[in-house]
Image: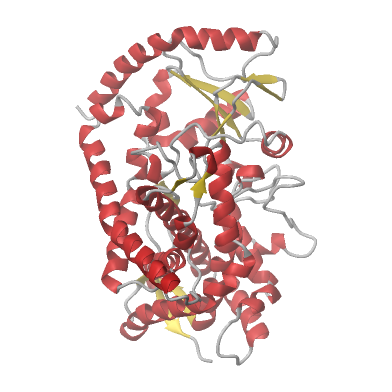
Amino acid sequence: MEYSWFRILFSLCLCAAATKIFFILLSQSKSKKTKLPLPPGPPSLPIVGSIFLLKRLLIDAESLLLDLSYKYGPIITIRIGSILEVFISSHSLTHQALIQNGTAFNYRPGAVTPGCLLDNTHPDIGSSSGTRWRFLRRNLTSELLIPSRYKCFGCARRRFLETIDSLLKYHVESGEPVQVVHPFRYAMFSLLLFMCFGEKLDEKVIKDIVEMERNVLANFRRFSVFQAFPTFGKFIFRNRWLQLIDMRHRQKSALLPLIKSRRERKEKIKQQNQDENIVSYIDSLFDLEFKDGGGRKISDEEIVTLICEVMDAGSDTTSTVFEWIMAHLVKDQTIQEKLYSEIQEVVGSEEEIKEDDLQKMPYLKAVVLEGLRIHPPSHFVLPHTVEEDVVLNGYVIPKKTIVNFMVAGMGRDPQVWKDPMEFKPERHLGEGEVVDITGSKEIKMMPFSVGRRICPGLGLGTLHLEYFLANLIRNYNWMAVDEQDVDMSEKQEFTRVMKTPLQAHVFQRAK
């Protein structure tokens, strides 16, 4: 009974694919004009494709794709029904696609982010393409994600660092272990809410929003079936669909009153000819108008989607990488003490670590880079698609094909990285494996993707990792619980998280 849905899904895919067979054949005939083949892949049956792989794709896609890559090479094709997907695991082919041919791969296949699974009519930035994507991304980067704006939130970062300190104080005094990611994740959500709304929200409101968004992200894998089967999925997985609707309702119930309150406050300030000293993302959204939509302003429901995107992308990804880095520091006290020594050498007896101090800490940056290399928050970048036939490595990628890039495999490739699964920050220092994670010249690792669709939050995300990691290592010594070995196994949620959440004893360091 557990997999009876699979048989139903198989039958429906068969019917759906049959209705589209004409368009598939048409696409193939156009591709054949190039006299080039599709990338290799597993056997594909007429109409249904490789649907016998569907179950494993849904349960453990990464191990399946690694097996297929060993057999067929660094670029492979899988067809499920009418959906054609290409997976690329090669550094050089990824550079050819996303850097050298970035324009061709600059599109999204539809809803690829949590906020757009339910309604992709007005998608967020991650799921958008074309004019909408350029318009919204330009606003986000110019209003929030530029270095000059980072400094505006320095006081907020210090305040939420104090929040983490207060949460850790109990564990220091009681001796009880702390689940490491919890206080950091809460601080990240709180900080990003402040950046979005320009004010510190009520504690209960923050906790409700944190719980709500964590529920969305923790269930993202279950909900991702609606990406592949947006029509049939809502009938086959009815309870899951209703759960997603309920989550969206809760998002709107929590955020729409905050949006209304902020708009009223802004209007009041404008009427009184006062200056608003605090920058916020939402203020920029109120003023946006889509020129290609006749001057239409963004609706409040669209603002909910865009705010959730910033919270989800900026909190969960950063928290995931932070936990993995802390796991390695707890596991290897030598690395933790070396990092602590560098921090003390730079800061000395100063009361706090300033953001300018971070630029004088190469080992700190190396620790963060190594964490991003082994444990990118997502093992695949958000999927791309092509709007016309593209030739790559002697193969044709037909129009509308979905293209995926295997991020974790690149960062763990033994042909590029020596001892790839060992945590060695030194490889990023001096004459070691110094890399440019933007991938402009070459790609060795790409935790934030590369090219035109590179994550615009790259700078802010690394700043948060460096700032909070430096302060929390300076203030506390983190030790394994009862000298137990740290479980480094993984599981998939919205990001690739620790299967067993990291717990550690914390001890106040003497200053």
> Residue at 41% across / 70% down in the picture?
187
Could you tell me residue 55's position as x and y percent? Answer: 37, 27
Residue 220 or residue 129, whichever sits in front: 129
Colouring style: secondary structure
Say whether residue 50 is left or right of residue 249: right
Label tally = 0
Q: Position of residue 120 (x, y in %)?
A: 40, 37
Q: Position of residue 486 (x, y in %)?
A: 44, 62
How far across and how far down the image is residue 438, in percent? Answer: 68, 51
Q: Which residue corresponds to the image point at 53% horizontal and 92% vertical from the top-left?
A: 511
Residue 108 higher or lower than 346, as above or below: above
Q: Is residue 97 above or below residue 301?
A: above
Left or right: where does residue 155 sit relative to residue 238? Answer: right
Name the quarter where the N terminus is drawn.
top left
Left or right? Give the position of 460 relative to 417. Answer: left
- Residue 162 vs 367, above or below: the answer is below
Q: Nearer the viewer, residue 470 or 128?
A: 128
Give the residue furthest to the right. Answer: 431
Q: Is residue 130 at all visible to an observer of this figure?
A: yes
Asked if one can make out residue 413 in the rendered structure from this viewpoint, the answer is no
Q: Quadrant of residue 338?
A: bottom right
Q: Is residue 510 above or below residue 44?
A: below
Q: Which residue appears at 48% of the width and 74% of the height?
A: 276
Q: Nearer the viewer, residue 240 or 389?
A: 389
For image coordinates 22% across by 30% down, the residue present is 2
Which quarter of the picture shows residue 366? bottom right
